[in-house]
Image (cartoon, rainbow, N blue to C red):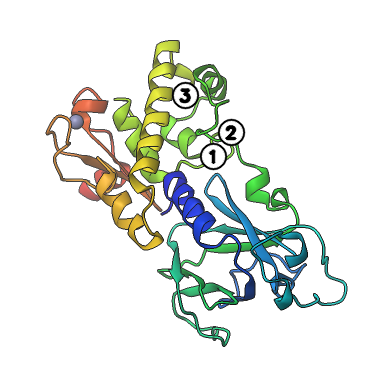
Amino acid sequence: MPELPEVESLARFLRQRAAGRVIDRADSAAISVLKTYRPDLTTLRGRVITDTQRHGKFLDLVAVPAAQAGNGSEPGSSEPADGGQPAEGPLHLVIHLARAGWLRWRDNLPEEPPRPGKGPLGFRLRFTDGAGFDLTEAGTKKRLAVYLVADPAEVPGVAALGPDPMADSFTAPALAGMLSGRRTQIKGVLRDQKIIAGIGNAYSDEVLHAARMSPFKLASSFTEDEVGELHAAITRTLREAVERSAGLAAGDLKAEKKSGLRVHGRAGEPCPVCGDTVREVSFADSALQYCPTCQTGGKPLADRRMSRLLR
Ligand SMILES: [Zn+2]
């Protein structure tokens, strides 16, 4: 699942590849993908991508009418939007890749729109020069989401986002304020997009391993020193992951994410820090991984599902 570092890298990748290109067409290839109705996707035709931003784990491509895009664009290819659609002002194509979604850049897309089907293709954006990208989603649970809005804050998930951990304002005292009084496990707090934006299941495991803390530690129990250690682990882990993937093509990001993880997805493998065996706690819909020696004083955490199975 793409999290902050991968989405940040995709945003940088698209800033280079897509900026200045004129949109030929945008098509949803699966019914559930497009979450907004107005303006419709034909409004994008002839618009120019001027920037790509990231909000938490959301990608945001900014598309303006060709006349407003300045030099380097091809105003000749602009077509009037359908009646009743907002033809002026920037539009934001906001993308949430969810758990199994991915973006695949392609230099030569067919002119015909994709046929809706049962395959992994969920959405396609094609530029007038034939380049563009596909949004694909593996698996049966379809959660890939695309929104076309005048303001990214119209997307409920974006409006609800907590502070971004890459922002200068994300300081140790700010983190202390987010944790204080929360009688919930730190693992869940780190993953909660409303508290901190961009960290998911993988990087919360990595952050807690780097901070040498149990995923079950209560947020409200953190001392000032512990908040400082957690803050350092968050910023270091995310920054290193962004640096590792900087400059990589979209297609190489997935492999890079996997190879950079120390405990997440590595149950049964030796911890790269101490050599202990990485363990796992399973939940109905996910699993977390951790190193007992580094994080829980050598004691394995209770895994309800495991003990139920063993009983
Ligand atoms: Zn370890």
Q: Which residue is disc 1 drawn over?
A: 197
Q: Is residue 210 above or below residue 7?
A: above
Q: Which residue is disc 3 drawn over?
A: 219
Alpha-carbon span between mark 3 and mark 1: 17 Å
- As helix, strand or loop, the secondary structure at mark 2 comes to loop
Name the quadrant where ligand 1 sits.
top left
Of the two numbered discs 2 and 3 on the same chain, state the one appearing first in sequence: 2
Viewer-nearest of discs 2 and 3: 2
Give the quadrant of residue 273: top left
Q: Residues within 10 Å of mark 2 (few under 14, many from 20)?
A: many
- Residue at 31% in and 42% down: 304
Quarter placement of the N terminus: bottom left
Alpha-carbon span between mark 2 and mark 1: 6 Å
Query: Could you tell whether 305 is left or right of 150 in the image?
Result: left
Q: Amino acid at mark 3?
A: Ala
Q: Which residue is disc 2 drawn over?
A: 163
In the rendered image, residue 3, in percent from the top left (x then y), is placed at 44, 48
Of the two numbered discs 2 and 1 on the same chain, state the one appearing first in sequence: 2
In the rendered image, residue 9, in percent from the top left (x then y), is placed at 44, 50
Q: Amino acid at mark 2?
A: Pro
Query: Could you tell whether 273 is left or right of 34 in the image?
Result: left
**Residue found farthest to the top:** 224
Q: Residues within 10 Å of mark 1 (few under 14, many from 20)?
A: many
